[in-house]
Structures are given as C-alpha cells and as structure tokens.
Image (cartoon, helix red, strand yellow):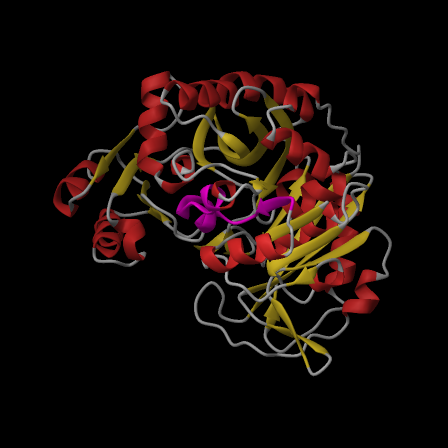
Amino acid sequence: MNVLLVGSGGREHALAWALAASPLLTKLYCAPGNAGIAQVAECVPIPVMDFPRLVAFAKEAKIDFAVIGMDAPLVGGLWDAFEAVGIRATGPSKAAAVLEGSKGFVKDLCAEYGIATAAYRRFTQAAPARAFADTLGLPVVIKADGLAAGKGVIVAETQAEAHKAIDFMFEGGFGDSGHAVVVEEFMEGEEASFFALSDGETVVALAGAQDHKRVFDGDKGPNTGGMGAYSPAPVLPPAMYADVMDRFIRPTAAAMRAKGLSYMGAMYLGLMFTKDGPKLVEYNCRFGDPETQVLMPRLKSDLLTALLAMRDGQLKNIDLRWSDEAALTVAMASKGYPGAYEKGQVISGLDAAARLPGVQIFHAATERRDGRIVAAGGRVLSVTATGRDVAEARTRAYAAVDLIHWDGAFCRRDIGWRALSR
C-alpha cells in the first residue's frame, strides 16, 4: 500500500524508518521530510499545515493511508481533511485532538472523572491568575492552554517569576496558545512518558520512556522539545504498565467517548511519580519526540499493521511485541537552541557514526545542499543506540555523538542519568 507520512522531525524519521520495514508497504512518501527521511521515503515539499495541497497530493499519488506525526496538523483537523475525501489516516479528529490542544480541557476532564493530577485553575485574565498563583506556594507551574512546541510551560521559583510568566503568556508570548492559562501546583517527583494506541473502544499499551526537557546538563536551563530520552525507564517498568492503563488511559478513553469525542490515535501520557503516587502531567495526541526515537528501535511488531488496526477499530486483534533491549537517544542541537540559532552548517561524521554497533541516527532538522547534509533547525539529530541495558545504549550513543560535528553543535552529556544513578 502507498503511505504518506506528514512531518519533518526526528519523530517522523523514526516512524518512517519503522514504516519502511513493513511488508505491507508499497511506497512511502513524506511531506515535507528531511535529508534523513529521504533515505527511506520520497520527500514531497509540502508544508504540514497546507491541508489542500496535502490532500491533493494524496489523491494524485493514490495514497491508501496517511500517518500524521505532528500535533499542529492534528489539532488543526488534517485527519478530518483526509477522511473527508476517503483517505484513511491516523487520528485523532480535530474535535478529539482537544486532548492536546487545550491543557485546560484535560485538567477539567481529570477533575470530572477522578483522574489524579495536580491542583489547578484555568484563567482568561491575568489578574485572577496572579492572585491564584500566590495561594499555591512555590514553585508554581504556569501553562499556556494551547500548543507551544513543547515550550509552553514555565516553572516559576518566585512570586515575581510567576507574575511575569502569566503576563508574558497573556501578552502573546506564546501567540494564540496563551489566550487562556492554567495555573497549577508544582508536583515534586520523577517524570516519565507512557504511550498507548486507542481505536475509540480498545486501548493497547505501547511502552514507557523518560525524556530530558531542560536544555543543559543537570536539568538546568529552559525547557525544550526534548534533549534526549531512553526506554524502558526504571521509574516506569513494564510491570507497571497495566496499572497505568487502568488509572489513566482507559478512564480517559472512556471519558472522551462519554463526551462524544471518541478518540482514535496515539495517546502520549506524561506522568509525575509523586510521594502520593502517579499523577497526570499532560496528554498529547501523537507520538512523542524524542521518545519515538527510542520506542521504534524496541518495537518488534510491524508498525504499519498496528496503525491500520487502530484506524479500523481492530486493536482487539493486536498483540505487540517488544525487544528486551534498552534504547537511548541524544539530541544534538545548534548553538543558541531553544532560542535563536544559525542554520546551514555542514554536518560531518554521519556515515562513521552510523556504522557503530547498535546505532541509528534519526534526522530532526537537516537538508541536503550541494551533496552535503547541513543543519536546518534547533534540534538537528537524534543519535540513538540500543544495548543490553541503558548503560550500554548510552555508551554506544555517545560514541556516535563524538564522531559527528558541525559548527556550534552541542548536546547534553548526561542523558540517562536517573537510570544510571539508581
């Protein structure tokens, strides 16, 4: 079958890599893709939010199935656009994508259905938001209600920082994402990510992982889209998956059905393991980045078969198999990220790094110019490795990182530190 993957990051390269191995696949396209994805798919230069062109291309190329990797197209209704012309696609629908499109909706859902999460209130004006923040103690968490490329959360250490964050969001610091703000208590604990598939009725567990959001070693600096990840995570071992499904995933899927928002798609659950037990941090309506870069190398089952079963309401017939090996990925970024950064630097060492045992390099933001691969974004590469355990995967990943260079490249050197410190 002909498959169109929508997206251009490291997550999409990992998905493309997995999809390309499917015996069901005839032809894989990716819009717009990147230089790494071009190694396993035909890239089509159509922006992810240009729905008319994406639909027109899908019809012209006789696409049988579309895999939408990114949050913005899902929240914007790309699934609906494909399905309206008879092209099956991974969801969720625009209506159900509110699970990621509004943090306030998720918090209200938790409150209504008894799903454990932090105490909170949501606001559309700055003054009452500041007043409520002052009652929660410090630190306090300020969240833009809508999408903000993984950066719409500020943990304020002082009252002044909290007020500044609230004003920043309402003044348009995150664009339209800050038209409403969620103010919530700070949860002390260890955070992890968990993934599942839902077809609206049946939910199937994928696996857990642990991300590293802060830009610098020791979890210092501003939040990013993710500087690295590993799977499985000791704080969320496979033995806990059934409990997480019962406490969070199944109640959420049932709540969405009850609200007339039947959820078909990947479910990304952010969890905080507190002294009072696990609590929900957030939901996302797609695979995570960089977590997908460690989940796909561990998935032994056919990804395309699983995604088709999800779309067609057949997850009850799916039994996914996973490797016992660990996987770890390190994000290599351009100097200045997550702020302003330069583009166009030539990347060297990719071929040598890719030849190392257990290593797979997923491109996050690259282009091919004059026969050479150049950096084209903030997070540029996800250097991934598998191993018998997190320690071996980490050693292999950093050995590959050390062979890759471009002017201004940097990465965190402590990915996996929580697992190794246990």
* Image quarter of residue 119: top left
Q: Residue at x 54, y 68 (%)?
A: 377
Whether residue 78 appears in magenta in the rendering, the answer is: yes
Looking at the picture, how far across and down is residue 53, in whole percent?
50, 60
- Looking at the rendered structure, the number of numbered marks drawn on it comes to 0
Q: Is residue 398 left or right of residue 332?
A: right
* Image quarter of residue 281: top left
Whether residue 117 appears in magenta in the rendering, the answer is: no
Q: Is residue 147 left or right of residue 60?
A: left
Residue 416 visible in the snapshot:
no
Q: Residue furthest bottom?
A: 370
Residue 8 higher or lower than 368, as above or below: above
Residue 189 vs residue 10, the one in the foreground: 10
User: Which quadrant: the C terminus?
Assistant: top right
Q: Residue at x 35, y 38 (%)?
A: 103
* Image quarter of residue 409: bottom right
Residue 146 higher or lower than 185, as above or below: below
Q: Is residue 403 left or right of residue 6?
A: right
Residue 42 higher or lower than 418, as above or below: below
Residue 348 vs residue 74, the one in the foreground: 74
Residue 312 visible in the snapshot:
yes
Looking at the picture, how far across and down is residue 66, in whole percent?
60, 46
Looking at the picture, how far across and down is residue 89, in whole percent?
57, 41
Q: Is residue 280 left or right of residue 302?
A: left
User: Which quadrant: the N terminus?
Assistant: top right
Looking at the picture, how far across and down is residue 116, in whole percent?
41, 22
Magenta segment: 64-81
